[in-house]
Amino acid sequence: MSNDLDRAESLYRQITEASLTDEEEPNILQDRYNHADILLRQERYELAEAQFRELLPELRNRPRPSNEEIAEYFLQQEEGAKQLLIEALEGQGKDYKNV
């Protein structure tokens, strides 16, 4: 399983790096979320924390869509990122009360 996670992390890192150069990339936030999640699964807590700390404000500040289903998905994605950030902090023995 570790090899699968290593491969997934590498692929998401490549996707994320390529996407960062293309401002029109609509899925960049999801790609970055997935990359951070893989880091967390690899127990690379410090890197996952850094990724989620950078990602959360962007998720929270993006424009709200008028489509209710998409708006609900955005809220779920934000809450998921917050919970994964908490896991990354717990993995390092850090306080997570002010996330």
Image: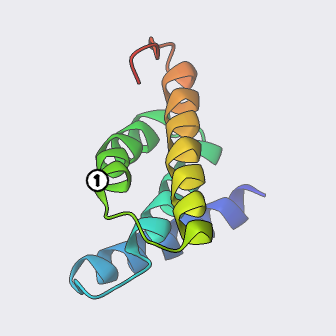
| The C terminus, quarter of image | top left
Judge whether 26 appears above or below 84 on screen: below
Kind of residue sitting beneath label 1: Asn
Colour mapping: rainbow
Please tell me which residue lies in front, 41 or 52. Answer: 52
| The N terminus, quarter of image | bottom right
**Relative to 60, is 74 on the left or the right?**
right
Judge whether 38 appears above or below 9 on screen: above
Task: Give the x, y percent position of residue 18.
Answer: 31, 83
User: Which residue: 51% across, 13% down?
Assistant: 93
Q: Residue 14 sits in which quadrant?
A: bottom left
Please tell me which residue lies in front, 61 or 7. Answer: 61
**Relative to 78, is 99 on the left or the right?**
left
Task: Give the x, y percent position of residue 82.
Answer: 50, 37
Please tell me which residue lies in front, 68 or 10. Answer: 68
Q: Residue 90 sits in which quadrant?
A: top right
What crowding class fits label 1: few (fewer than 14 Cα within 10 Å), some (14-19), or many (20 or more)? Answer: few
User: Which residue: 38% across, 63% down?
Assistant: 64
Judge whether 72 appears above or below 45 on screen: below
User: Dot 1 lies on which element?
Assistant: helix
Task: Give the x, y percent position of residue 36.
Answer: 49, 53
Q: Residue furthest right?
A: 1
The residue indicated by pointer 1 is 61
Judge whether 17 appears above or below 38 on screen: below
User: Which residue: 42% across, 79% down?
Assistant: 15
Task: Give the x, y percent position of residue 92.
Answer: 49, 20
User: Which residue: 21% across, 83% down?
Assistant: 21
The number of callouts visible is 1
